[in-house]
Image (spheres, rainbow, N blue to C red):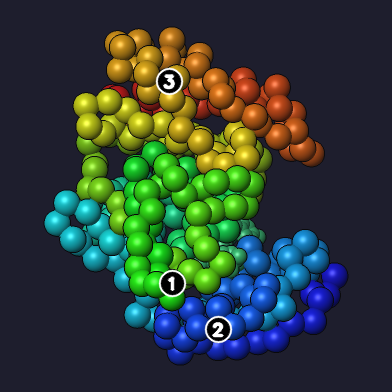
Amino acid sequence: MIPAPFEYVRAGSVDEAIAALGSRDDAKLLAGGHSLLPAMRLRVARPSTLIDIGRLTDLSYVRDDGDTIAIGALTRHHDVAGSEALQTGCPVVAHAASQIGDPQVRHMGTIGGSVAHGDPAGDMPSVLLALDASFVAKGPGGERTIEAGAFFTSLFETALAADEVLTEIKVPKTAAGWSFMKFNRRMQDWAMVGVTAIRMNGGVNVGLTNMGFTPLRAAGVEEAVAGGADPTTAARRADEGTAPPSDAFASAEYRRELVKVLTKRALEEAMA
Ligand code: FAD
C-alpha cells in the first residue's frame, strides 16, 4: 500500500529534531526507516510529519568509556556488528546485531530505532534488557538517563516522551560468558523466540524476545540459577510470567515449549 500523506523535515541537529517534534502534532523521527516505513505503508502508522535524523552522523559511534561502552543511537546494525570495541568488550551486542535481518536491513537500520520502536520481537531490545543497559534521551528540558528495566512499557510503547530523541545506549563491559539463541525458519527472519543469557554480577541475566508485550527478563530462571539449579532445571521456569503471541509462525503453546529448550541451551553455552 501507499502511505498516507505526510510532511517531510530534515533535521540538521538533535536540537532541531527536538524543536520540530515539539512544534507538530503526531510527528515521528525517521532513522533507518526499516520499521517505520513498512508500518506507514500498511497505514498502521500515519504520522503527520517525518523528521529525518538519518544524516546526523555525530550520533553514529561506538566509544569505550571505561567500564561501559557508549553507542550512538544512529549507529547502523552493520557498524555495531563490526565494532572492535563491542566485539572485545561486550560481544553479545555485536553478535546480536550481526543476526538482524539481512545485509540491507543491517546497513540501514539503527540501534536507536530498534530500541525506540519497542517491538517485543526485535533482537536488540531483549539483549539490552539482559545487559541492564541504559538509554540517554534528550528533550526540551535537557538530557535524562532511563534504565532498560523501566524503558519498555508496553507493545511498541517506551518511556520516551513524544518530544524526546534517544541519543545514546550505554552497555556494561562484560565478556565472561554469553549466549544469543535466535530461533527462526529462515536466516533473515525475525525470531520466533529469542533467548539471551549473560553471565554478570555473579549470576546469569536472561532476556526473552517475542514472549510477551515487551522484551522480558526470565526472572524465574535467573532466581533458579542463583539458587544453584542446573540449566535443565532452571530452564523449566523460562515461560513464567510470559504472554507469548500466537501467529502464523507458531502458537503460544509452541513458544512456551521452545523458550524452555532455547533457555537450556543458552544457559549451558553461557556457563560453559
Ligand atoms: P525507524 O524505522 O526509522 O524508526 C522506528 C521507530 O523508532 C519510529 O517510531 C521512529 O520515530 C523511532 N525512532 C527512531 N530513531 C529514534 C531515536 N533516535 N529517538 C527516538 N525515536 C526514534 N529487526 C530485528 O530486531 N530483527 C530482525 O530479524 C529484523 N528483520 C527485519 C527484516 C526486514 C525485511 C525489515 C524491513 C526490518 C527488520 N528488522 C529486524 C527491523 C530493523 O532492525 C529496523 O531497522 C529497526 O527495528 C528500526 O530501526 P530504524 O533505524 O530503521 O528505525
As drawn, is 205 to the left or to the right of 19? left
Please name which of the two marks, 3 or 1, marks the residue nearer to the observer: 1
Number of callouts: 3
Residue 20 badge = 2
| Residue 257 picture location, percent across and down | 62, 20
Q: Is residue 225 visible?
A: yes
Residue 32 badge = none
- Tag 1: amino acid: Gly
Q: Is mark 1 within 8 Å of ligand 1?
A: no
**Mark 3 closeness class: few <14, some 14–19, many ≥20 residues within 10 Å:** many
**Mark 1 closeness class: few <14, some 14–19, many ≥20 residues within 10 Å:** many
As drawn, is 171 to the left or to the right of 149? left
As drawn, is 23 to the left or to the right of 265? right
Q: Which residue is mark 3?
A: 221
Which residue is located at x 30 percent, y 11 percent? 228
Q: Is residue 104 visible?
A: no
As drawn, is 259 to the left or to the right of 141? right
Secondary element type, mark 2: helix
Disc with the residue nearer the chain's start (2 vs 1): 2
Distance, label 3 to label 1, CA atoms, is: 37 Å
Q: Which residue is mark 1?
A: 139
The residue lying toward the viewer, choosing from 207 and 100, is: 207
Identify the image quadrant of the C terminus. top left
